[in-house]
Amino acid sequence: DGGITQSPKYLFRKEGQNVTLSCEQNLNHDAMYWYRQDPGQGLRLIYYSQIVNDFQKGDIAEGYSVSREKKESFPLTVTSAQKNPTAFYLCASSIPGRNYEQYFGPGTRLTVT
Amino acid sequence: AQTVTQSQPEMSVQEAETVTLSCTYDTSESDYYLFWYKQPPSRQMILVIRQEAYKQQNATENRFSVNFQKAAKSFSLKISDSQLGDAAMYFCAYRNYNGNQFYFGTGTSLTVIP
């Protein structure tokens, strides 16, 4: 079945450590996205990529980095520079173009202590 | 950037009754796309319904329908015959016509009372 996988579902890290969240899709979608979800703030865009080897910053990119070496994969690294990294992270993909919606992965809950 | 506003942080509805969730947006474009997503306690985002701005007819999907008022920039979701499984966070989203960016509202938490 086609879809988006994010692993792991729960991730725990110590403050000061970088951590990478995985996102893989087999939908053959060109565009991929990372969102952060905090209570009461909806989904905020961190980074997005419309094509391999290219990506753009979203509204809250500071303290995060991404890569897009393969069409299927769009990993997100939360660096130690991110001041409040504890959050729920959602990965999504879409077909470039008009009325196509985004498809979402199940999300990763990151807790940094 | 476009702004999407959901002014109702929380709503409740009796089982089998009808509820309407509000969404307004700000845009200078004439063509765009609007979506409602549902996020149940599992936190998996699920598409509920979509609307193309160039279509005058309101979209419907079974018990879910929208009231799209383009001039007012309003896109409300009506849930008829509410069921316990409808309890979730609902997000309104905007997609611009030629781009790949989606803009989300802050969500409305819907409680269904048995």
Image (cartoon, rainbow, N blue to C red):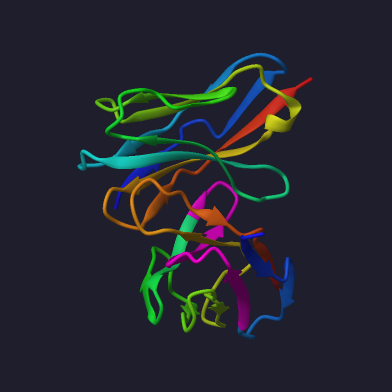
Vertical side of A81 occupied by A102: above or below: above
| Image location of residue B31, percent across then percent down | 24, 40
Count up the numbered dots. Answer: 0
Q: Main secondary structure of the magenta part?
A: strand
Q: Residue furthest front?
A: A1
Q: Residue B109's spot in the image, x, y percent? A: 61, 35
Q: Please tell me which residue lies in front, B96 or A79.
A: B96
The magenta-colored residue range is A19-43
Name of the residue lying farthest toward the right = B114
In the image, taking residue A84 as reference, residue B58 lies left or right, namely: left
Residue B96, percent from left and from top: 30, 49
- At a point 51% along the width and 30% down the height, the residue shown is B8
Residue B40 image offset from top left, x and y in percent: 68, 42
Q: Quadrant of residue B100?
A: bottom left
Q: Is residue A55 left or right of residue A24?
A: left
Residue A91 among those drawn in magenta: no
- Image position of A4 with respect to A79: above or below: above
